[in-house]
Image (tube, rainbow, N blue to C red):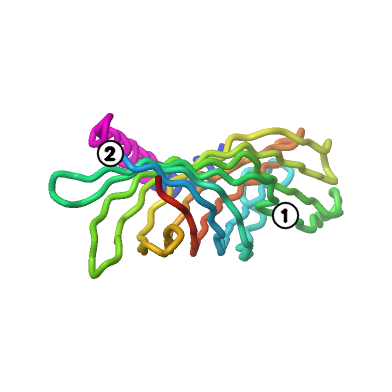
Amino acid sequence: MENLLLGPCYITTITYKVNMKKLIIAILGFTLVCFSSNAFERKFGFSASMAMLDTTVTDDIDSNGSIDTTKDISNDVIIPSLFVEFATDLPNGGKASFGVDYIPMSAELESRSVTQNEDGGTNGTNSGTLDASNHVTAYVTLGGDVAGNHVFALAGMMYAEGEYDLKSVSSTNRTGDVIIQGTKLGIGIERDMAEGFMRVVLSDNDYDPVSATTSNATQVTADIDSTNLTVSFGRSF
């Protein structure tokens, strides 16, 4: 239904995201090939991210074939996470790593309400929330040393389990589960410290649109993007 409502721009966006996922998968595969079975460095640590969430929410109320409301929502949150990495030196003097980042908590990504007023129709307030849990990011980094610091580019794929709760005045309330996926691109710098290392990463996190539909085909779609500034502390062994 989304492609009928949003037209060619939506199709172009989907094509771009599919191509981006293919590129990141290729980068992940290339990085894994670079690893030597007998020479790699293991890293682990914790991170805190300032996530600046920007969400576009659209509603198709009462299944009338058009988008009735569109709203842009911004929200800033602090997100803690844990990570583990495996790094190896490259023949050209650079370094590649493969890592997994896990958020050990659930969070409400979005909460939204809209007033429904129709002449001779149903009036009231529709609302919806989207909670995410088990958020995992698999990523690779490629970089090298510059002036005593390790500078790198990062690419990854994100996965989370989502649960939505829709309340509609014109249909049956509905809860359900969705899979949330997305891509992550960023740049970062890492510096050794006396007891480990410190890392700062600036990343763009682009989630696929998430849709849910009530019993009368009222569709709510959320397109979530996030710019994250992440500070990490860890140790190598």
Q: Residue at x 44, y 40 (%)?
A: 138
Q: Quadrant of residue 188?
A: bottom left
Q: Is mark 2 on a helix, strand or loop?
A: helix
Q: Residue 111, can we see it?
A: yes
Looking at the picture, tell me which residue is in the foreground, 111 or 81.
81
- Please provide percent x and percent y for residue 136: 53, 41
Q: What residue is pinned by disc 2?
A: 31
Which of these two is toward me, 95 or 133? 95
145 in magenta: no
Residue 228 badge = none
In the rendered structure, which amino acid carries the disc numbered 2? Thr
The answer to whether residue 8 is left or right of residue 39 is right
Q: What residue type is labelled 1?
A: Ser
| The furthest residue to the bottom | 147
User: Up-down: is 55 above or below 130?
Assistant: below
Is residue 194 left or right of 115 when viewed as pictured?
left
Residue at the outermost front position: 194
Query: In the structure shown, which secondary structural element does the residue marked by tag 1 occupy?
Result: strand
Residue at mark 1: 111
Looking at the rendered image, the quarter that the C terminus falls into is top left
First reached walking from the N terminus: tag 2 or tag 1: 2
Q: Quadrant of residue 53?
A: bottom right
The N terminus appears in which quarter of the rendering?
top right
Q: How many labels does the image show?
A: 2
Q: Residue 35, position in %: x, y?
A: 26, 35
Magenta portion: prevailing SS class: helix
Does residue 38 show up magenta in the picture?
yes
Residues rendered magenta in the picture: 16-39
Residue 130's x, y, as percent? 69, 46
Q: Give the percent coordinates (x, y) of residue 2.
A: 54, 41
Please say if the residues under marks 2 and 1 sit with CB atoms less than 8 Å apart. Answer: no
